[in-house]
Image (cartoon, grey):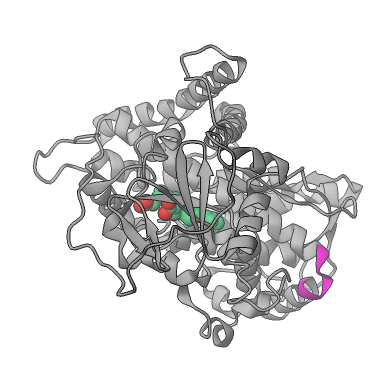
């Protein structure tokens, strides 16, 4: 099967009827050569810089990051234009070369006919119905976390909640997609090292994307050497998983019926060839990391926000106690636990793990009446659109009930897009929502989480939107029926 991304040129480009575009979009002036790069640092980082740019210049802002012309697009109409209405004119762009250092040429980074074929192959396991097969494994792994927390609940030891959520979601993705139990003695250490290695690689790639200059990887700087060592460690772990399963396949055929079996069994429609190990590896590393890091960040923010908002926390506790009465939930309980779901959705409104993502136009376009040149970089930011004052009442407030159906129906569809939109929408959105919904309900049923120190934690951009420092929390066993 061919590994190269096939980038199809656009046909039938859609254009919104509007007046002829003349004036370039407004934006901060910046310096010659460096453009606005120095301001990113002086404003305290990219989040602050883009937020200020939106406040000062509006819904379409032109930003110059060294040689790259960026357009920050915030209005939901314009988000829909890029992701849906005129999507044939946009691809993920040259910026994906850096992400390929992390995820290879897998589903996240590939393009064109090749991407489409891989997506079609993997899609069935990720539909709302497809993900129900993972409900049992999700519940079991969340229960193991609850059991592990009995000792800290008794002795009052504080937990790094980000690390706890990462262990949980990594365990779930390994079990459901690769049929690996990460608590097994022979993988437990390797998996934890791989998690740390990936966190470093994500920070490295995200720092590179934000800086005007970086040494090519072959230059042995300390950061490059550490990046290569981290990459080798992950290859060792996940490459070993792929090789071992391939050997099992050849001896006994597919045994597990998981994503890895699907990838190894797939045959190209025209050539009949199977995917080589390198391609299977790229799809596996993509699903393994895209499939746990983001959900772990969302859950960590949820516990932080609930601890800061006792009213919302009480309403959640009341709901899980009334609906579940102390018993372990199954998937059929989820529709009766709407508040737990709104907590997840509202958390991802304020702290969307994928807080920005980018596109590149093949041809000149026009957005909001401004010209958008081919090959510029379009920056879409769920973080900013989710706080757009024209689309959200009191956007800075944590208010889960705004996701009640009658309220959500009044909003612009693209005022909220934590999973992106159009054909490149996150393949794991139903998986992530089911997992986070169960985790919030089951953890809140058993424990109350308190911040170890009464502090305010700011978000930091490190590939995904993470807490700027570890969130230390104490877990208190809740009194109640059947526990
Ligand atoms: C809260 C959790 C998650 C969030 C916020 C999230 C967010 C996103 C976003 C915004 C995109 C689109 C990026 C773009 O258009 O450039 C995306 C794509 C993707 N996500 Fe997720 N994701 C989450 C969970 C997951 C899970 C659980 C999986 C896998 C099990 C996953 C796998 C992927 C893959 C493979 C893509 C690329 C899809 C394609 O282009 O066809 N994600 N995700």
Residue 441's quadrant in the figure? bottom right
Residue reaching furthest to the left? 270
Q: Residue furthest top?
A: 220
Q: Look at 24% across and 41% down and name the residue there.
A: 265
Question: Residue 26: x, y in percent?
Answer: 52, 58
Q: Which residues are magenta?
A: 308-312
Residue 432 forms part of the magenta stretch: no
Task: Give the side of residue 136 with respect to residue 183, left or right.
Answer: left
Mark count: 0
Main secondary structure found in the magenta portion: helix
Residue closer to the observer: 274 or 344: 344
In this rendering, position of residue 70 left or right of residue 130: right
Q: Position of residue 134 (x, y in %)?
A: 47, 57
Residue situated furthest bottom in the rendering? 406
Camera-side residue of 404 and 207: 207
Question: Is residue 149 left or right of 288 when viewed as pictured?
Answer: right
Q: Is residue 179 above or below residue 443?
A: above
In the image, residue 392 lies at what x, y percent? 62, 76
Examine the rendering and report whether any part of residue 179 can be seen.
no
Image quarter of the N terminus: top left
Q: Quadrant of the C terminus?
A: bottom right
Q: Name the residue rendered at 34%, 36% in the picture.
A: 105
Residue 194 placement (x, y as % from top left): 56, 30
Residue under the image location 50 percent in, 41 percent down: 289
Question: From where the camera sits, is residue 59 visible?
Answer: yes
């Amino acid at each position: 099967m061919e590994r190269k991304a096939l980038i199809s040129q656009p046909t039938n480009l859609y254009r919104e009827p509007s007046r002829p575009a003349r004036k370039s979009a407004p934006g901060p002036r910046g310096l010659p050569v460096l453009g606005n790069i120095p301001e990113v640092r002086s404003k305290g980082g990219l989040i602050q810089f883009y937020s200020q740019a939106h406040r000062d210049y509006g819904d379409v802002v032109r930003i110059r990051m060294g040689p790259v012309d960026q357009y920050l697009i915030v209005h939901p109409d314009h988000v829909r234009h890029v992701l849906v209405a005129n999507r044939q004119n946009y691809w993920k762009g040259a910026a994906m070369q850096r992400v390929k250092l992390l995820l290879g040429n897998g589903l996240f980074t590939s393009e064109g006919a090749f991407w489409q074929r891989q997506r079609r192959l993997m899609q069935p396991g990720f539909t709302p119905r497809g993900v129900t097969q993972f409900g049992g494994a999700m519940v079991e792994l969340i229960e193991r976390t609850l059991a592990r927390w009995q000792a800290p609940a008794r002795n009052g030891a504080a937990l790094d909640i980000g690390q706890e959520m990462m262990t949980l979601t990594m365990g779930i993705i390994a079990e459901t997609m690769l049929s690996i139990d990460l608590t097994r003695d022979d993988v437990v250490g390797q998996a934890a090292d791989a998690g740390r290695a990936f966190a470093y690689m994500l920070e490295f790639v995200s720092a590179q994307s934000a800086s005007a200059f970086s040494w090519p990887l072959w230059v042995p700087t300390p950061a490059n050497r550490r990046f290569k060592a981290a990459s080798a460690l992950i290859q060792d772990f996940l490459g070993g998983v792929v090789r071992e399963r391939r050997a099992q396949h050849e001896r006994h055929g597919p045994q597990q019926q998981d994503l890895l079996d699907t990838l190894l069994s797939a045959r190209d429609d025209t050539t009949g060839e199977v995917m080589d190990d390198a391609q299977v590896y790229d799809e596996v590393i993509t699903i393994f990391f895209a499939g746990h890091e983001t959900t772990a960040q969302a859950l960590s923010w949820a516990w932080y926000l609930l601890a800061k908002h006792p009213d919302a926390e009480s309403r959640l506790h009341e709901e899980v106690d009334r609906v579940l009465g102390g018993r372990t939930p199954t998937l059929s309980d989820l529709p009766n636990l709407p508040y737990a779901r709104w907590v997840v959705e509202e958390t991802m409104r304020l702290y969307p793990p994928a807080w920005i993502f980018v596109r590149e136009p093949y041809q000149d376009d026009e957005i909001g009446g401004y010209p958008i040149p081919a090959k510029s970089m379009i920056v879409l930011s769920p973080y900013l659109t989710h706080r757009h004052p024209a689309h959200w009442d009191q956007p800075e407030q944590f208010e889960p009930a705004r996701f009640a159906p009658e309220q959500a129906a009044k909003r612009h569809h693209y005022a909220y897009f934590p999973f992106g939109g159009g054909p490149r929408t996150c393949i794991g959105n139903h998986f992530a929502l089911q997992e986070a919904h169960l985790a919030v309900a089951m953890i809140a049923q058993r424990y109350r989480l308190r911040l170890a120190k009464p502090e305010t934690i700011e978000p930091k951009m490190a590939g995904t939107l993470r807490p700027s420092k570890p969130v230390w929390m104490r877990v208190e066993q809740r009194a109640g029926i059947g526990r």
